[in-house]
Amino acid sequence: MGSVVSSRNYTAISLVSVLALVGCENSYQTPLRLGVQNWKPQSVSGPIEVRALPPAQRVMQDYEQWSNSQTVTKARVYSKTLRGPHQVDFRVQYVRGDTPAGAADNTFVLFTYKDPTDGQYQFEWEMVGRHNADFLKLDARTAEVWLEPFGMSDDGKMPRLQIVAVEGLEPLNVLVALPGKRPLETE
């Protein structure tokens, strides 16, 4: 009986210690590592399929068709090589919010990408913690990014795409493979 009580007390003390550490001013924040060769994230529950980003006016329809065309579970991401002169309205926001583990900072980056042949896209990147996001300012350089669409801009004119991987940035997250929406065929 004594060992059961001792293990419960140990578990409770361990849990309180972990929560205290996590809640302390973003002590859980992982620093960004730039210039890495292995920048492509892994996935859980299935493989990753990468396709070229279609023209802006077709992104949402294309992604819907892509998801509906198969029953296979996989992460579906678009790839685009971004060039500096086409990036406009670059903004960084730091937001502090309450979480179950305490107050936490989040870094949000938004910008418009104006492709001369494919149209305009709204790209967004976010990460827990307060980070310098200058690596996303393209200036004269190029960078490949992986993207997941998640809606339209507030004015309904541009697809919104979450940047889930950036060339040269160590991946801090994993992609989640989702099942395709194609109904199983009955015989």
Image (cartoon, grey):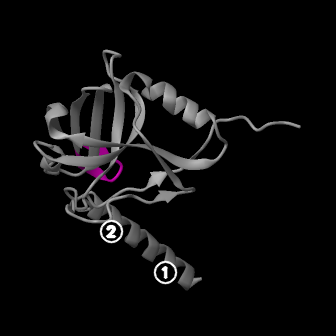
The segment highlighted magenta reads 97-106
Dot 1 falls on a residue whose secondary structure is: helix
The numbered disc on residue 6 is: 1
Residue type, numbered disc 2: Ser
In the image, taking residue 173 as reference, residue 46 lies left or right, namely right
* Image position of 30 with respect to 165: above or below: below
> Looking at the picture, how far across and down is residue 48, in whole percent?
50, 53
Mark 2 Cα shell of 10 Å, populated few (<14), some (14-19), many (≥20): few
Q: Earlier in the sequence, mark 1 or mark 2?
A: 1
Callout in the foreground (1, 2): 2
Distance between the alpha carbons at the discs numbered 1 and 2 = 16 Å
In the image, taking residue 186 as reference, residue 136 lies left or right, namely left
Q: Nearer the viewer, residue 172 or 83?
A: 83
Residue at figure coordinates x 33%, y 61% from the top left: 19
In the image, taking residue 37 as reference, residue 58 lies left or right, namely right
Mark 1 Cα shell of 10 Å, populated few (<14), some (14-19), many (≥20): few
Q: Quadrant of the N terminus?
A: bottom right
From the image, give the main secondary structure of the stretch colored magenta.
strand
Q: Nearer the viewer, residue 80 or 102?
A: 80
To which quarter of the image does residue 149 belong?
A: top left
The residue wearing badge 2 is 17
> Looking at the picture, how far across and down is residue 85, in whole percent?
14, 35
